Image (cartoon, rainbow, N blue to C red):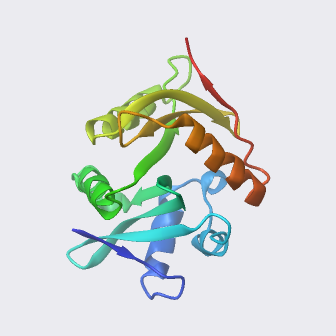
Amino acid sequence: MELRLVSANDSDKLLLDEINSEAFPENERTALDELYASGGAVPIDILGIYENGVPAGYFAVRKWGRLRYMAYFAVRADLRCRGIGSRALGLLREYYPHSVIVLEFEAPDASLSGNDVRLRRRAFYLRSGFCETGWYTFYDGVELELACSEQDFDAEAFMAFAAHLHLTFSDTVPKFYRKD
């Protein structure tokens, strides 16, 4: 398995578009062309996850100083639950060796249907070496938990990144908080 930077005019981008469409519901999906176009103020890397030379998924990673924000992560539906995601996350950490990777996932909530999926996703990221930060945010009415590739989460740096991202994407209104 390997990660490759995929440009907007790369022939594999079409396969990544298909993965994007199958992986995310329409209300949570951003077209890859939009992601490429949005890279000006906060650069973005689209990294193809290749298994045996064939795209198996992708990461969309925003870059801000030493911070790397994993905005999207998708694996082809027919390849899920085969360890590809865990291996890909390990490669992502190697790809950005001197960076701190931050990601968000839906916070578990026992009062909501689908909480078992939230718990499994959370366990997956923690098992894959990401650490709890104790920070949360809301986006589109969904509570998200932040996780980090290092024990020491620099909340100030992440909030500065989020504020800068808000200048580019006005619908992204960062509201961070900790739970007691």
Q: Please, which residue is most extreme toward the right here? A: 170
The quarter of the image holding the N terminus is bottom left
- Residue 135's spot in the image, x, y percent? 54, 28
Q: Residue at x 56, y 23 (%)?
A: 112
Q: Is residue 133 positioned above or below 58 on the image?
A: above
In the foreground, 87 or 174: 174
At x 63%, y 25%, the residue is 177
Residue 94 shown left or right of residue 117 in the figure: left
In this view, 46 is above or below 145: below
Q: Position of residue 129 (x, y in %)?
A: 28, 40
Determine whether, in the image, residue 41 is placed left or right of residue 19. right
Q: Position of residue 45 (x, y in %)?
A: 49, 69
| Picture layout, residue 84 above or below residue 10 | above
The residue lying toward the viewer, choosing from 140 and 61, is: 61
Spot the residue most to the top. 180
Q: Residue at x 71, y 47 (%)?
A: 163
Give residue 3's position: percent from left, percent from top.
31, 70
Which of the 4 image quadrants contains residue 75?
bottom left
- The residue located at (70%, 40%) in the rendering is 174
Quadrant housing the C terminus: top right
- Where is 155 relative to 97, above or below? above
